[in-house]
């Protein structure tokens, strides 16, 4: 079994050179960022390796256990959660007035990566606290903020997001849970499924954020409201009162992330209904829930990156140790480590390049969250908000889809040994598979990208970003470094493909939405590959300058330059066939009937 090691040097490079952490440190309230950055990353790395990593296999093998409505988490999880909460990690980006540390959102990039890389099953618990905190902070009443936020921030209580119902998966217009007024509170009845850490033994209270309908609510998504439904009611003095009518009726038996209890939750099981409190205004629940969903979608994108990096680390370690085969060169006799074999090297480089591109894009996106919230210029805030909204489905969809490929490739490096559970790499393959599904499947992310982010605003935000890419590509063409220039040329071709496809989808959407949406997932992949290539090209330009200047860490920068060139040749070059697939292949998606999809079994 390999031990997770946080890639601190690359994290620091991305934060400082690409995400602009020094500029973020100049924003109001973030003045101490530069002073604490390295210590935060180093302490997080120690916790990830020293505490969470040791429980990763334990969580996978033991899983969670349900009995009579109670859920027991794997050995060590409860103690690790207390350490995690006591260290203040939950409140990292939360304002100090609620007990947080008030640090930039950008730091969620590397810290979330470390928690999920070391133990994704554990990390899903505190991850949802972030979303619950943000939702209550932005739209909750002053009384709700005072009552719930300090304990959610401290980790004394945990939060959940309760959307999905048996008949309403991603189609939240079908939500049937009800909320009946009773004085200043409501009685909630209904069932929610797939609720992450909906019940557990790690904290004294669980604060459920639940979507439900008021009696006079309109049909569809416009009739959904958001409610706080505590496991234990909270008294006026902050102490815990009686148990609410909330019951976990079972947990799922899953392919992966076994350390994370995924619960079926019944509200109103005893008959009268669970006590709930309206958050914000009636019938605006879905709008408010998107606060949590967008935060969760970004976090899931980082989860994919994290598990992919862990799988890559494991595969690299194995490739260095596994002695098998001889060099393909004539006359070679001695067996060698498989890392010397060209195809194994190709697989390792492919994983490394994609991981670095994903990390760069995710952290840059996180940085825009800080500029959106804190920059004094309203125009700059709006620009970064638009960029974040465009990139969230890309970070979630592209990073997770790529992560599944990375974990599969890592298993391939092991050969037959990878298919055996004892080596550990199979766990990463199983764990990562959910990331393309929960918080909105890749297809949903792609529909969001095409429908809301491209068609609805007539491509205005996409045009702004693509224009920046084109300008940068022209700058790369002037470089004296051959690797930078070659990377820039492939990048320019990718930007041209993205431009053409975006215009093509926009035009076709006017007359045929089926054609426009038919290849929305390949379009999302194209965005990810090109946007990731943008960040890798930026990294290459910086690395070439550092190498030319004789930087003390020249070896790191040479590797970065070589990795960027590999990404251009092996990943970014896919833009051409994605362009063909979308423009020429969209119509064929809908070209056969449902009956024609059936295999002809008449001769069987």
Image (cartoon, rainbow, N blue to C red):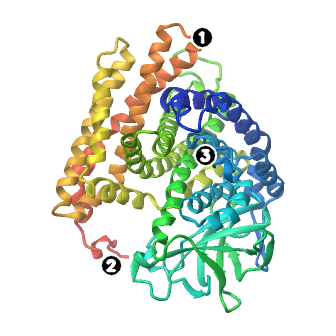
Residue 488 shown left or right of residue 177 in the figure: left
Marks 1 and 2, how far apart at CA: 71 Å
Marks 3 and 2, how far apart at CA: 45 Å
Q: Residue at 49% across / 71% down in the picture?
A: 285
Front tag of 1 and 2: 1
Q: Which numbered tag is attached to residue 307? A: 3
Residue 493 shown left or right of residue 392 in the figure: left
Front tag of 1 and 3: 1
Task: Name the residue carrying label 2.
Answer: 602
Say what secondary structure mark 2 lies in. loop
Front tag of 3 and 2: 3
Q: Residue at 27% across / 35% down in the picture?
A: 467
Front residue (pair 555, 100): 100
Q: Is residue 122 above or below residue 313?
A: below
Q: Which numbered tag is attached to residue 552? A: 1
Front residue (pair 295, 283): 283
Q: Residue at 62% across / 42% down in the picture?
A: 311
Marks 1 and 3, how far apart at CA: 31 Å
Q: Which numbered tag is attached to residue 111? A: none
């Amino acid at each position: 079994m390999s031990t997770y090691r946080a890639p601190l040097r690359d994290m620091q490079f991305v934060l400082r050179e690409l995400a602009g952490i020094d500029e973020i440190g100049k924003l109001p309230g973030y003045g101490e960022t530069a002073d604490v950055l390295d210590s935060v990353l180093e302490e997080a790395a120690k916790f990830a390796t020293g505490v969470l990593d040791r429980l990763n296999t334990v969580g996978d093998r033991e899983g969670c256990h349900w009995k009579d409505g109670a859920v027991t988490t794997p050995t060590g999880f409860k103690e690790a959660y207390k350490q995690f909460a006591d260290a203040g990690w939950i409140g990292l980006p939360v304002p100090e007035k609620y007990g947080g540390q008030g640090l930039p959102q950008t730091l969620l990039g590397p810290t979330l990566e470390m928690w999920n890389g070391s133990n994704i099953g554990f990390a899903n618990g505190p991850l949802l606290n972030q979303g619950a905190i943000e939702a209550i902070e932005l739209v909750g009443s002053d009384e709700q903020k005072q009552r719930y936020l300090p304990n959610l921030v401290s980790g004394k209580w945990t939060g959940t997001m309760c959307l999905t119902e048996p008949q309403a998966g991603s189609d939240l217009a079908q939500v049937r849970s009800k909320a009946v007024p009773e004085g200043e509170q409501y009685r909630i009845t209904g069932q929610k499924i797939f609720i992450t850490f909906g019940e557990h033994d790690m904290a004294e209270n669980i604060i459920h954020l639940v979507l439900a309908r008021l009696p006079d609510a309109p049909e569809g998504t416009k009739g959904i409201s958001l409610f706080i439904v505590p496991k234990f009611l909270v008294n006026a003095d902050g102490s815990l009162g009686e148990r609410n009518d909330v019951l976990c009726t079972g947990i799922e038996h899953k392919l992966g992330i076994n350390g994370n209890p995924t619960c079926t939750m019944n509200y109103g099981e005893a008959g009268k209904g669970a006590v709930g409190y309206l958050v914000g205004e009636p019938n605006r629940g879905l709008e408010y829930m998107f606060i949590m969903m967008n935060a969760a979608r970004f976090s899931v994108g980082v989860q994919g990156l994290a598990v992919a990096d862990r799988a890559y680390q494991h595969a690299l370690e194995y490739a260095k140790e596994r002695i098998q085969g001889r060099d393909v060169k004539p006359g070679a006799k001695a067996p060698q480590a498989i890392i010397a074999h060209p195809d194994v090297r190709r697989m390792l480089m492919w994983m490394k390049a994609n991981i670095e591109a994903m990390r760069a894009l995710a952290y840059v996106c996180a940085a825009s969250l800080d500029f959106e919230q804190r920059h004094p210029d309203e125009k700059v805030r709006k620009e970064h908000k638009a960029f974040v909204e465009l990139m969230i489905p890309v970070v979630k969809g592209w990073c997770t889809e790529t992560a599944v490929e990375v974990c599969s490739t890592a298993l391939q490096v092991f050969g037959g040994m990878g298919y055996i559970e004892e080596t550990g790499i199979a766990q990463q393959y199983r764990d990562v598979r959910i990331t393309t599904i929960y918080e909105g499947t890749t297809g949903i992310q792609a529909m969001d990208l095409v429908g809301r982010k491209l068609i609805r605003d007539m491509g205005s935000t996409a045009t702004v970003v693509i224009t920046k890419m084109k300008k940068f590509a022209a700058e790369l063409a002037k470089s004296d470094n051959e690797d930078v220039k070659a990377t820039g040329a492939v990048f320019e071709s990718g930007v041209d493909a993205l431009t053409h496809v975006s215009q093509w989808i926009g035009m076709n959407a006017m007359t045929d939405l089926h054609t426009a949406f038919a290849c929305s997932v390949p379009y999302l992949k194209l965005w990810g590959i090109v946007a990731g290539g943008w960040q890798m090209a930026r990294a290459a330009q910086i690395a070439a300058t550092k190498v030319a200047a004789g930087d003390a860490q020249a070896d790191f920068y040479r590797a970065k330059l070589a990795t960027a060139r590999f990404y251009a040749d092996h990943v970014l070059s896919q833009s051409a066939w994605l362009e063909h697939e979308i423009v020429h292949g969209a119509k064929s998606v809908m070209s056969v009937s449902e009956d024609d999809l059936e295999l002809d079994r008449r001769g069987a």
